[in-house]
Amino acid sequence: MSPASPSANPHVAAMSAYVPGEQPQGGGWVKLNTNENPYPPSLRALEAIRLALVNEGAALRLYPSPDSSPLREAAARFHDFDAARVVAGNGSDDILNLLIRAYAGPGRPVGMLDPSYSLYPVLAAAQGAEVIRVPIADDFTIDPAAIARCGASVFFLTNPNAPLGVSFTPAVVRKVAEVFPGLLVVDEAYASFAEGDCVALARELPNVVVTRTMSKAHALAGLRAGYALCPAAVAALLHRVRDSYNLDRLAQVAAAAALDDREWLNITVGQIRSTRDRLIAGLRQLGWMVNPAAGNFVLAAPVSTSRAASPETAAHCFEFLKARKILVRRFPNHRLTEKSLRISVGTEQETDVFLAAVAVWMEG
Ligand SMILES: *Cc1c(COP(=O)(O)O)cnc(C)c1O
């Protein structure tokens, strides 16, 4: 007789896993669905990995820096921030998880903008924390007073917002920070593509954390590295609850080298912004409704002469593109996104292929 399946924690048994964007197998795809950088990373990142592997990888025998010193120091240089107040994570998703582990739980809800990143509710559920959603208005504004009274212990403000693509000014975020009584986390995964950022708020205020990732602008999604710029007291708490070696040796040095290569970043971000402008202009010319875009992606509602903007039209266009091995993303579960497709900004050539396929779809 085999033993019965043991019962799990009820809040874990009841939760669902995060659903990541599709990673298609095999070649030939124009992959515009998960906001990865279409260009290879800084050569300095590769050089740092090679250097860490000399003598037949002897250094891999040894545990890495427990607090990711190389990465923390590079992030401090990059942002002109105190390295003692930088906490590194195995991707910024790790940092988001640590923030929830430290600040949320039963009776201590997680707040988030609606719509925003669908990972937050999964991380909240894993800690038994309730989720409170504060809506973004139809004109893409947010209400600081509504966030202030929402009752969350920690609030995630995704800026630029994903999946909408719009950004909120540092002045508006400051207003939120001044009235929200809990910890305000500004998730700046896409800030390198936008006009401003909220690093000064994290430098100044005791209740603001800014999180950053190496996955988007730095083209290192496969590496898994991110970090938080924190008030000193928050950094101390996150160090208590993180894994003792939460970043591997190669990720630490490669991410640090990538941060030090500012020239690579400026060139790559400049190219992606320019392609983004061309993508937006191309879609507007075809009559699509396009959101203002501050990240490396564009949210746009497909229309053609025979089809009005609707969830069905978006689904039809999505399937048409997928059949041609062009992958974009759909967010059918929110009124501000259900009629739209989210298109990551690819290379110039990928953008041409995408726009040409859209032109064909418009004729159907
Ligand atoms: C991509 C993304 C992240 C996380 O990136 P990591 O790969 O875990 O560093 C965090 N927040 C938002 C809003 C993102 O889009």
Image: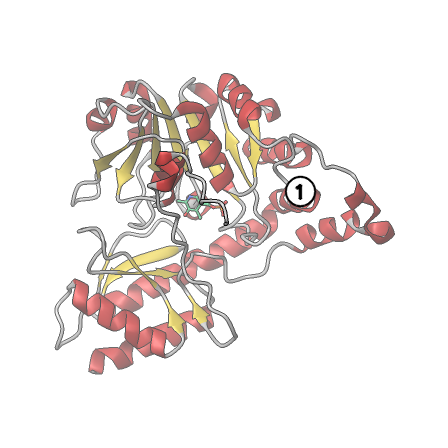
Considering depth in this image, is 77 or 267 the residue closer to the camera?
77
Q: How many marks?
A: 1
Is residue 199 among what the camera can see?
A: no
Give how far across and how far down residue 324 sits, in percent: 37, 79
Is residue 311 among what the camera can see?
A: yes
Considering depth in this image, is 216 or 319 the residue closer to the camera?
319
> Quadrant where the C terminus lies?
bottom left
Give how far across and how far down residue 286 sits, in percent: 23, 71
- 229 left or right of 139 in image: right
Pointer 1: what residue? 248
Q: Secondary structure at mark 1?
A: loop
* Residue 114, placed above or below residue 345: above
Give how far across and how far down residue 6 sits, in percent: 45, 40
Q: Residue at x 55, y 54 (%)?
A: 219
Q: Residue at x 69, y 54 (%)?
A: 46
Q: Residue at x 60, y 43 (%)?
A: 259
Considering depth in this image, is 317 or 355 the residue closer to the camera?
317
Q: Residue at x 25, y 78 (%)?
A: 361
The image's colouring method is secondary structure
Q: Amino acid at mark 1?
A: Asp
Task: Classify mark 1: residues with Cα within 10 Å, few (<14), some (14-19) or many (20+).
Answer: some
